[in-house]
Amino acid sequence: MENGKAALKNRTAKNRRAVFFSRSTRMLLFILLIASMLLLSGCGERKKEKALREEGIELLTSGDYQGASGKFDAALALYKKEKPGELEIDILRYRAEAEYKAQDYAAAGSTYSLLLSEDGEKPEYQDMKAMCLVKSGGSPADALSAYEKADELRKKKMSPLHQDVLFSLGDTLSAGSDEEKEQALTLYRTALDGRTTGTENDQIYAELTNRIGMIYYHQEKYEEALNCFSKGAADDPDGKELLFNEASCREHLQQYQEALDLFNSYISKFGEDEKAEHEILFLKSRLQNGG
């Protein structure tokens, strides 16, 4: 009798374990199924994200910048994680380019700011942020700050993009208040301080010297301006604007014969020019009248 009770208890325990394991197995299978579905869903969204990226690049290449930007936005919307990955950073770069080419400079500037926060301090991001601020009519002080950060990251080395930002920002500051004009002078002088040798660099620095000279010229500081134009001409002997500006300076300084010689040299080098010919007639008249 006791043996029968023991056998019954064993069978009951086995049945309970079987039921438990059966439920555990079903639960595990259910969890695996859900995980698989989520994984497949994630893979599907990843494929869509990549496909939208490719579509955006095609539109960007074809010149449909707004359409491209829309594709990049749709691709980024599929990414659910807080921190963007390599693919998302790549898409953000393309989106910034599309926004900039669409002349939506405020949007492009925001995207470059996002790239700076998510992909680290990179000089090209700071340069483009500065350019977007200039083109959107943003704060010149903020644009100058972004340019200076890019300059520091580049260790004062010039690049085509950095040069474009330098000149665009300088134009904006030069057209502003007296304080901003002084900032433009500082900007150009700082770039000159980091000069290196080479024909291409000489032309860049001749342009910088010319720009400094033009600020002095418009302030009627003709001696300082003349000094700049003369230095610039030494770096770029074929500089058309430098030669014209030097001649104009000498005219304002009442160095009429020197100015006439320079304007004649200008015509000889670069051909007929209405403004130069007008100045030549004026100077000849002054000299004939004992000016």
Image (cartoon, rainbow, N blue to C red):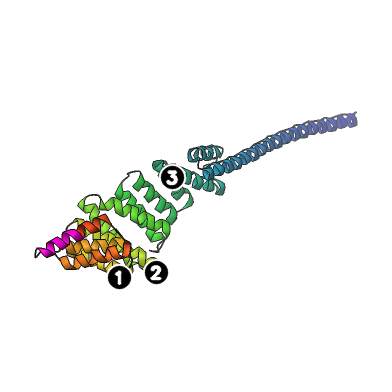
Instruction: Tell me the kind of residue under disc 2.
Output: Thr
Per the image, the residue denoted by label 1 is 234
Q: Is residue 288 magenta?
A: yes
Tell me which residue sits at (51%, 46%) in the image.
94
What residue is disc 2 on?
A: 199
Amino acid carrying label 1: it is Ala
Label 2 sits on a secondary structure element that is: helix
Residue at the disc numbered 3: 100
Give the prevailing secondary structure in the magenta stretch: helix
Frontmost residue, 34 versus 262:
262
Q: Position of residue 237 (x, y in %)?
A: 32, 68
Q: Nearer the viewer, residue 170 or 12?
A: 170
Is 46 situated above or below 142?
Answer: above
Question: Dot 1: few (<14), some (14–19), or many (≥20) neighbours within 10 Å?
Answer: some
Which quadrant holds residue 22?
Answer: top right
Q: Residue at x 32, y 52 (%)?
A: 169
Separation (CA) of disc 3 from disc 1? 37 Å
Is residue 72 toward the left or the right of residue 114 in the image?
right
Say whether residue 226 is visible.
yes
Q: Which residues are the magenta region?
A: 280-291
